[in-house]
Image (cartoon, rainbow, N blue to C red):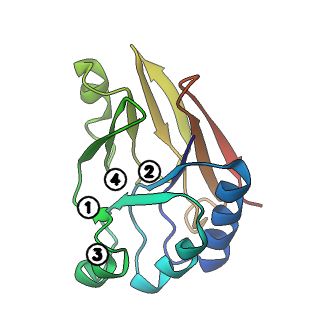
């Protein structure tokens, strides 16, 4: 299983809650789809019992320090990789999700930026936006968990 989070925007309480949820769910990997904002917001991720990877969003400030503090695990978008035989692409902005799903090159597309949670399938591609973990824009803090065996995802409210 993969935990997905985005748009944390320095909300330390919700970042800690999300780490607890991911640990309870037993995810093997956590993917952050951008907008950490400040390097100090990475501190709670040290308690994850899973691997961690992320991409930079449009509101991330000190990219060099974010990259350094993450141990080089935050990348420029789009970032594509393979996990448990699933081809995954992660980006912050949503503009290419439909075209990437139409291409058939990826099993899972993860994005953020809109602050609105979304789980949908297009062709054989699972598209997931975990919503905003920070809750600053819409007041509803959420994360997601992807079941890579069933190729489905659930959105989980943090409060």
Which residue position holds label 2? 114
Give the mark nearest the N terminus, 1 or 3: 3
Disc 4 element: loop
Label 2 CA crowd tier, 10 Å (few <14, some 14–19, many 20+): some
Disc 2 element: loop
Which residue position holds label 3? 67
Label 2 vs label 3, nearer the camera: 3
Q: Is residue 67 above or below residue 32?
A: below
Which residue position holds label 4? 92
Label 3 CA crowd tier, 10 Å (few <14, some 14–19, many 20+): some
> Which residue appears at 45% of the width and 60% of the height?
52
> Which residue appears at 28% of the width and 83% of the height?
62
In the current view of this chain or complex, which residue is farthest to the top?
123
Q: CA distance from mark 2 to mark 1?
A: 19 Å
Label 4 vs label 1, nearer the camera: 1
Q: Is residue 97 visible?
A: yes
Which residue position holds label 1? 75
Q: CA distance from mark 2 to mark 3?
A: 23 Å
Give the mark nearest the N terminus, 2 or 1: 1
Label 4 CA crowd tier, 10 Å (few <14, some 14–19, many 20+): many
């Amino acid at each position: 299983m993969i935990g997905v989070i985005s748009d944390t925007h320095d909300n330390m309480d919700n970042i800690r809650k999300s780490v607890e949820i991911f640990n309870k769910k037993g995810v093997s990997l956590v993917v952050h789809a951008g907008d950490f904002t400040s390097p100090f917001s990475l501190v709670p991720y040290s308690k994850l019992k899973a691997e961690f990877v992320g991409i930079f969003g449009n509101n991330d400030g000190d990219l060099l320090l974010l990259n350094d503090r993450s141990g080089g695990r935050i990348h420029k978008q789009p970032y594509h990789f393979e996990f448990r035989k699933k081809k995954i692409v992660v980006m912050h902005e949503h503009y290419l999700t439909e075209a990437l799903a139409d291409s058939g090159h990826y099993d899972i597309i993860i994005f953020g930026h809109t602050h609105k949670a979304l789980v949908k399938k297009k062709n054989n591609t699972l598209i997931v936006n975990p919503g905003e973990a920070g809750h600053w824009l819409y007041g509803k803090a959420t994360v997601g968990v992807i079941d890579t065996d069933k190729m489905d995802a659930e959105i989980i409210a943090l409060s």
